[in-house]
């Protein structure tokens, strides 16, 4: 791996994990690890361009059909692809289909960029995780195999003990907190061959377990606000991503666009501005 490498563009595709859900900004939008990573890359490379095409709730087939070709057409230096986990969490999952679509995505993306980054997604501890663990590990085995065959990099978040800590997960128990996203950004940063800024796998300080009554109140709140709506969407065939498009995709024109720093000099990114692909 090239150390202290330079990258001029990044496209991120996938589902809610890459969209950045639960890392909410004051204006109600989401930031997430991909945005954090892009800002850090832009701070060291004038003219850096970024596009996040990820949409919450998307299955691997939707990611391939709706995002992969658009990402490949942008010809970025780096593409990150995280997908398939939503499929494994469905009661019925055709792992053969997941395997085929993920392989299709990697085969299209690998020739289109200088570096393709795949991930073994993090998983929090608990009974739900144990139920779906075999499917997840089958998915991650495929990720490793595809990376080996196509020269992609793999960020192993699944093997990071700290990301199994419940304090790294939002109240919906499905998405990482801002601190979790920050750590993922650092993990990808290091995978890209850039100098470490911190130990993203460092464990959190020991904490006093919450009382039984507190846990039960949290369980009831979680079920009412997150679990029951999630089950309802599954039963009716709806998705939280229905009618949504990626942050850097213009649905009216049917095309993606870049964002780049307003300041042409190296340094922290204050604001981004839109740059159309043909510019």
Image: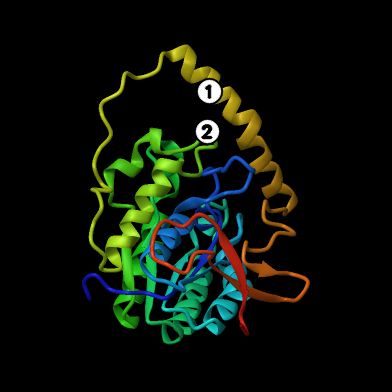
| Residue at 63% in and 63% down | 246
Quadrant of the image containing the N terminus: bottom left
* Above or below, comparing residue 266 to residue 122 in the picture: below
Farthest residue, direction bottom: 111
The numbered dot on residue 218 is 1
| Image side of residue 259 versus residue 80, left or right | right
Asked whether disc 2 touches disc 1, contact meaning CB atoms under 8 Å apart, the reply is yes
Residue 58: give x, y in percent of width and height.
60, 60
Please tell me whether mark 2 sits on a helix, a strand or a loop.
loop
Location of residue 103 (image quadrant):
bottom left
**Label disc, if present, on residue 239 of the rendered structure:** none
Q: Mark 2 sits on what residue?
A: 171
- Residue 143, quarter of picture: bottom left
Residue 104 location (% of width, % of height):
50, 80
Total labels: the figure holds 2
Q: CA distance from mark 2 to mark 1?
A: 8 Å
Indicate the colouring scheme.
rainbow
Seen in the picture, residue 238 relative to 23 is either above or below; the reply is below
| Mark 1: secondary structure | helix
């Amino acid at each position: 791996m090239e150390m202290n490498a330079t990258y001029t563009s990044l496209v991120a595709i996938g589902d809610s994990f890459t969209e950045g859900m639960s890392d909410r900004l004051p204006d109600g939008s989401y930031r997430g690890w991909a945005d954090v990573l892009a800002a850090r890359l832009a701070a060291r490379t004038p003219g850096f361009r970024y596009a996040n095409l990820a949409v919450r709730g998307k299955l691997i087939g939707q990611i391939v059909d709706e995002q992969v070709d658009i990402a490949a057409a942008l010809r970025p230096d780096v593409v990150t692809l995280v997908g398939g986990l939503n499929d494994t969490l469905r009661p019925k999952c055709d792992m053969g289909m997941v395997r085929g679509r993920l392989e299709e995505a990697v085969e299209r993306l690998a020739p289109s960029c200088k570096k393709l980054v795949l991930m073994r997604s993090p998983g929090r501890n608990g009974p739900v995780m144990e139920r779906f663990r075999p499917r997840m590990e089958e998915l991650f085995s495929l990720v490793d195999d595809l990376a080996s065959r196509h020269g992609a990099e793999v960020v192993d978040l699944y093997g990071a003990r700290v990301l199994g800590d419940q304090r790294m997960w939002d109240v919906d128990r499905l998405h990482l907190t801002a601190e979790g996203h920050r750590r993922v950004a650092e993990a990808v940063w290091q995978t890209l061959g850039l100098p470490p800024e911190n130990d993203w796998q460092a464990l959190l300080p020991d904490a006093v377990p919450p009382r039984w009554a507190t846990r039960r109140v949290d369980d009831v709140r979680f079920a009412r606000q997150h679990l029951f709506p999630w089950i309802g969407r599954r039963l009716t065939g709806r998705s939280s991503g229905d009618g949504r498009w990626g942050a850097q995709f213009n649905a009216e024109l049917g095309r993606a666009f870049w964002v780049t720093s307003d300041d042409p000099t190296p340094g922290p990114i204050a604001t981004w501005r839109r740059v159309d692909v043909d510019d």
